Amino acid sequence: MTKITARLRPHERLNDSEAFRQAFQRRHWESDSVLAVYGIENGRDSSRLRISVSRRKVRAANARNRLK
């Protein structure tokens, strides 16, 4: 099994609550039963994303962080 080590750089993440709220309200997100990805348009070369994993499906925090 190959381990993928791609990561979002800090400027590519939705860290502040205002940007996350905008992405959520404008419905710029997709999800399945475990993973949700939120994004927002920013007029830059790279997109800004936030990834979350359902606590109901993946109970352990370290397992959720590995999935992200």
Image: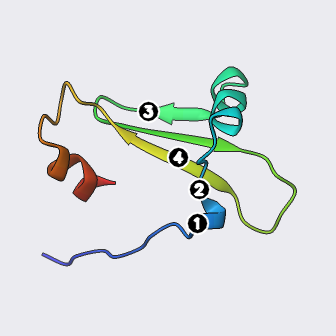
Q: Which mark is residue 10?
A: 1
Q: What is the C-alpha distance between the residues marked 1 and 4? A: 11 Å
Considering the image in quadrants, where does the C terminus appear? bottom left
Label 1, residues with CA under 10 Å away: few <14, some 14-19, many ≥20:
few
At x 72%, y 65%, the residue is 46
Q: Quadrant of residue 26?
A: top right
5 vs 25, left or right, is: left
| CB atoms of marks 4 and 2 within 8 Å | yes
23 vs 1, left or right, is: right
Type of residue at label 2?
Answer: Arg
25 vs 59, left or right, is: right
Q: Quadrant of residue 57?
A: top left
Q: Is the residue 20 above or below the residue 39 in the image?
A: above
| CB atoms of marks 1 and 2 within 8 Å | yes
At x 23%, y 30%, the residue is 55
**Which element carries disc 3, helix, strand or loop?**
strand
Type of residue at label 4?
Answer: Arg
Q: Which residue is mark 4?
A: 50
Q: Which residue is mark 2?
A: 13
Q: What is the C-alpha distance between the residues marked 4 and 2? A: 6 Å
Residue 3 position within the rendered picture, expressed as x and y whole percent measured from the top left: 22, 76
Q: Which residue is mark 3?
A: 31
**Which element carries disc 2, helix, strand or loop?**
loop
Q: What is the C-alpha distance between the residues marked 4 and 3? A: 12 Å
Q: What is the C-alpha distance between the residues marked 1 and 2? A: 5 Å
Type of residue at label 3?
Answer: Ser
Front: mark 3 or 1: 1
**Which element carries disc 1, helix, strand or loop?**
helix
Q: Is the residue 39 above or below the residue 21 in the image?
A: below
